[in-house]
Image (spheres, helix red, strand yellow):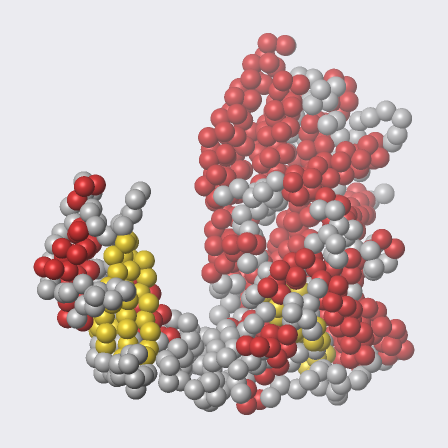
Amino acid sequence: MNAFLEALLIATVIITVLMTVTAWALWFERKFAARMQSRLGPTMVGKSGLLQPVADLLKLLQKEDILTTHADGLLFNLAPVLAAGAAIGAAAVVPFAPNIVGANLDLGVLFLLAIGAVTVLPVFAAGWGSNNKFALLGGMRAIAQSISYEVPLLLAALVPVILAGSMNLGEIVEYQSKHGWFFAWPFFLGIPAFVLFLLAMLAEANRIPFDIPEAESELVAGVTTEYTGMKFALFYMAEYVHTLVASAVAAALFLGGWDGPFAPGLHWMVAKTLALFVGVYWVRWTLLRFRSDQLMRIAWYFLVPTGVALVAGTAVWVVWRS
Amino acid sequence: MSEKHTLDDTGNYEHPLYKTLLNTPGLSVGVASLDDLLAWGLTNSLWVFPMATSCCGIELMATAASRVDIDRMGTIVRGTPRQADVMVVAGTITVKMAPRVKLLWDQMPEPKWCIAMGSCAISGDFYRNLYSVVPGIDTFLPVDVYVPGCPPNPEALMHGLLRLQEKIQRQRKGEKVVPDVNPDLIHVTKPSVPRLCDAARTKEMDAAQLLSATNATTDETSEPLAVEFTGALPKQELLAADFEGVLKELGVEASATDGPPLVPAARHVELAQRLKALGYRQYVSVIATHWVAKTGRKGKDEAEPEHFEVVTLLRTVGAKSRVASWSVRLAPGESIPSLAKVFAGADWQEREQWDLVGVPFANHPDLRRLMMPENYTLHPLRRDLAADLPLAPWR
């Protein structure tokens, strides 16, 4: 088959599946949060509230589209599209199975980190374009947070890269299926790097306990304060897609990706991704939000030195072993 | 705000997309079922904006919590009006609050609904005839569902939301169910200085506001204290005799009867400065009362003219703290010098007393309305204020 057509097909499938999974991930999160707070969550719309995302979407489609008088129309309207685009773009290099990958880049990890850094731009564009003090404060916090957590994320991602000797995500997974998952061996490098990656990932995706850019108790709704209807939905969706993709990347980098016994690779990848995704929810509905200064302190006093030590340790380990 | 939204024949909000679909040939067949689908979406995803001002707000929170759980019907609480569909007004709305509620309501995107939760929001209840309370939010908001109760229990609010769902479905079928707003009541309370968003707001007003803000923070205009406070005083100096001693120095007689000593208004600031230097560093409160003229009862008490009585209360900070209080009497037309230059905490307290009781404070840096609306002209706690005065334009 034509290579271009094949890529297009895979891209369509991946985007469709991602968006669908995201919609029902919203339902799942509401059910999950409800159970954690001894509630029931959505039950009335469809069986077990399964049609809740559909109803929400239909509702948001019908809402009035408000652009405030003093808002920057271009930035304001571009931001949600960019946010969703960047979040989905990151999925391009994630290998879901040996032959299911949007773009098999040799610099896959670098691409991922670059896209991850781009996701903060629409957030700030939204904060600036809204001409709303709460949105602007949220945008500023997002910038500070992203710059801080980009460093530990990069350092944590470097550990499997050095161990496998490749920046191609597919090759990293293949290396793990031959030599064991990095989470298991060398566990003294793999487990701390995995935890570091998860923490930095949570911060990148603005999830609790790192969700100070939207901190609803102090900033109304953060950067999305002025957004109505589908524009808000795009932002909301981007956040979930980002978390989902980041979970998939963590699964590929540390948990052996598609590698696993008995079942086909795709099943394992999906299972690992969703397990991590649920873990993220679990953290979200258990912990409280950090303060802005605490967040910076954690990043620069704790996570970055740990990351540097881990990378140095990995380099030593690789040289010593060879 | 965008003017793109359209109204259908019954005056209800209609999305422009809907009109396009209706006019597309071949699609009109499916529009009926599409309409049902859209209505189903609207009714099953009512996001709430909590306009919770008092005890009803607690019940609103309980409605979202585990026993009743409005999330079952897809209702979640959003903190921003831009993403909400239903404004639940839970609590008493005061005359000062009403324009803010109206502003938040205007910020919500169409289609939107309003639930008046609790008797205060519905009618003002027993605060109805109070000088500061709006007699029911339907004087300025189009209320869709009234949930009675004081406060209504969570089940009642849930029932109200279910009624709202029914109402929305009837609305989509073309019945006119939205109550009209009385146009005379929408723009009643305007601040005396136009807000930033108002068309009448000018650059000069911005500059003036900025200037007053900078002046309030500089100490250039404040008078130097007669006695400077130098560090913590030894404990034995804080004796009960201190206060009496200062009073004696100032030539004030301790009152023979119960109650704080009567100090002439001219000595008010000086006394406060001396006491501050003695260690009475906390300005606790100022309590003013307005007395109407009294004829006096034979053999029991004497006739008294109309006057204000202003009692100031100071205390020392730390263990075994001591309290000093004195009162100042003001005949009508007299004013009392402000203590805002001596105690920063006096600023707002004196503002409040002026706002509610009408005590004139001289040399106050910022004597504006604090509790009452910006354009209010009366002082509601004056004894001569009749309850049936035409107080607010809401009634």
Looking at the picture, tell me which residue is in the foreground, B90 or A29.
Answer: B90
The extreme front residue here reads: B299
Residue B66 place in picture, x, y as percent: 73, 52
Dividing the picture into quarters, in which one does residue A216 lie?
bottom right
Q: For this view, does A176 lie left or right of residue A113? A: right
> Residue at the location (75% across, 88% down)?
B9
> Residue at the location (59% across, 69% down)?
B91
Residue B156 place in picture, x, y as percent: 74, 67
Q: Is residue A282 visible?
A: yes
Residue A197 place in picture, x, y as percent: 61, 32
The vertical placement of B206 against A265, above or below, is below
Looking at the picture, tell me which residue is in the foreground, A279 or B222.
Answer: B222
Looking at the picture, tell me which residue is in the foreground, B377 or B227.
Answer: B227
Q: Is residue B231 visible?
A: no
> Residue at the location (55% across, 17% down)?
A313
Residue B301 place in picture, x, y as percent: 29, 79
Number of marks in the rendered image: 0
> Residue at the location (47% across, 51% down)?
A140
Q: For this view, does A277 lie left or right of residue A295? A: right
Q: Quadrant of the N terminus of chain B?
A: bottom right
Looking at the picture, tell me which residue is in the foreground, B274 or B140.
Answer: B274
The vertical placement of A241 against B386, above or below, is above
